[in-house]
Amino acid sequence: MDDMSCEPSCDDAVMGCGESHIDEKIACLIGLQIRSPFYQVETGLMALLKNCLELEAGNSTSILSGYVDHFHSIESEDVGWGCGWRNIQMVSSHLLMRRQEAREVLFGGSGFVPDIASLQRWLELAWERGFDALGSEHFNRKIYGSRNWIGATECATLFRSFGLRARIVDFGPKELESLCLSVPGSSLGAQVSKINDRGKRKVVQVYGPMDKYILGRHYDAPLAGSRGDENSRYSSMQLGNNLGGGSGDYVLNKCARKNKGSEILVHWVWNYFSDESLSKSGHHCVTVSEKPPLYFQHDGHSRTVVGVQVKHQQNGTQQFSLLILDPAHRTAALKTSLKENDGWQKLIKRGVHTLKKPQYQLCYIEPGIASEEEMELLKRIDSIFLEF
């Protein structure tokens, strides 16, 4: 189908069911949640992308996440604010298809990706259960029916509420590290002073690293409204592995930072997708990873990283590109460009030179399901900070 109509949202009965009992609310939501419509590619979008990568000329190596459905924003529904939810849907599509343990717990074991309204209900329930309690205060613990932008914090919070180990990594310049929650001595909800353009000092509330973007542009306005496509905070991944060192190998001086910062990010992504569970796709230059796609956040927008490519240049250098699915692109257009092997690079490939934002965040999902004790630890959202 070429267009998707908006299906009915979760009924208000969810919040009216068992007001004093979380389990009753969850049971109501499981029954009322709606499967999200999406443009379904018959052979799978990732299979088409793999074929195109195999046909590319040149000495390159690509690693892809095994399965991802593309969820694009709908003009009548969420254009301009829904990219965060769409990326959560893309990550969920992989988890439901490729991880049995995740399929059993995600969205009450429904086995499908819910629509945005249903995801908003699930996030509210996560907040009510104590996940990211301080961050939820920004939204007054209410998100259902709103057009507020969300980001990596809400992504991690939602997945953690089901027992998944969602982690966040921040990438940025050293001078902004003090605003990140991973810094020793910093605290969630810390008060930060900013100087506005009239020379007056204003104290604002910071809930997560992505709030720096709002502070930088709109620190005269209260944060009670919508914060810019956000957010935030946690990771315990070992960055070095069998395919080249992690971020610790990159000791960068300030002069070189602008040119090398994005390389730190793409090398991290390469290391993430490169693991011992890689399987050959039938072509030496393309491998398939069991790793889920990455929620990829920066100021003003978020996308989904579904893989990474490196081209080996004749001069011995390596040219890295992220492989990205953008909710702003129409799925039909992506399918056509991939099937015809024409123009898909402009839609999906993002080289290091295109990563011009001063800060980025990635949210990834580790294997396994958390125990009850670990679930309590997962309620507090934080992050690892890697300097650009």
Image: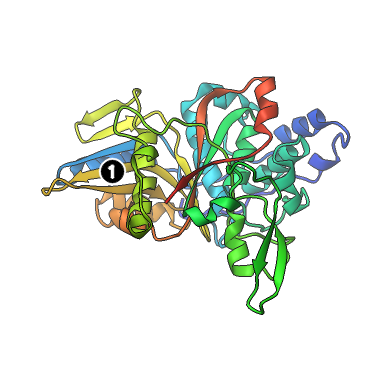
In the displayed structure, 108 sits above or below 251; it is above
In the displayed structure, 266 sits above or below 75; it is above
Which residue is farthest bottom? Answer: 198
Which residue: 36% across, 35% down? 271
> Is residue 107 something that shows in the picture?
no
Q: Position of residue 235 (x, y in %)?
A: 53, 36
Place residue 269 in its image quadrant: top left
In the displayed structure, 242 sits above or below 38; it is above
Place residue 195 in its image quadrant: bottom right
Q: Secondary structure at mark 1?
A: strand
> Is residue 216 something that shows in the picture?
yes
Estimate how packed mark 1 is, as few (under 14), some (14 to 19) or many (20 or more) residues with alpha carbons within 10 Å: many
Q: Nearer the viewer, residue 260 or 27?
A: 260
Q: Position of residue 95 (x, y in %)?
A: 51, 31
- The answer to whether residue 332 is left or right of residue 311 is right
- Colour scheme: rainbow
Q: Nearer the viewer, residue 13 or 358?
A: 358
Q: Nearer the viewer, residue 384 or 134?
A: 384
- The answer to whether residue 210 is left or right of residue 30 is left
Q: Position of residue 41 (x, y in %)?
A: 40, 43
Q: Amino acid at mark 1?
A: Gln
- The answer to whether residue 181 is left or right of residue 128 is left
Q: Position of residue 273 (x, y in %)?
A: 37, 34
Which residue is farthest right? Answer: 20
Place residue 16 in its image quadrant: top right
Disc tally is 1
Which residue: 65% across, 24% down? 374
What residue sits right under mark 1 in the picture?
309
Which residue: 25% across, 35% down? 286
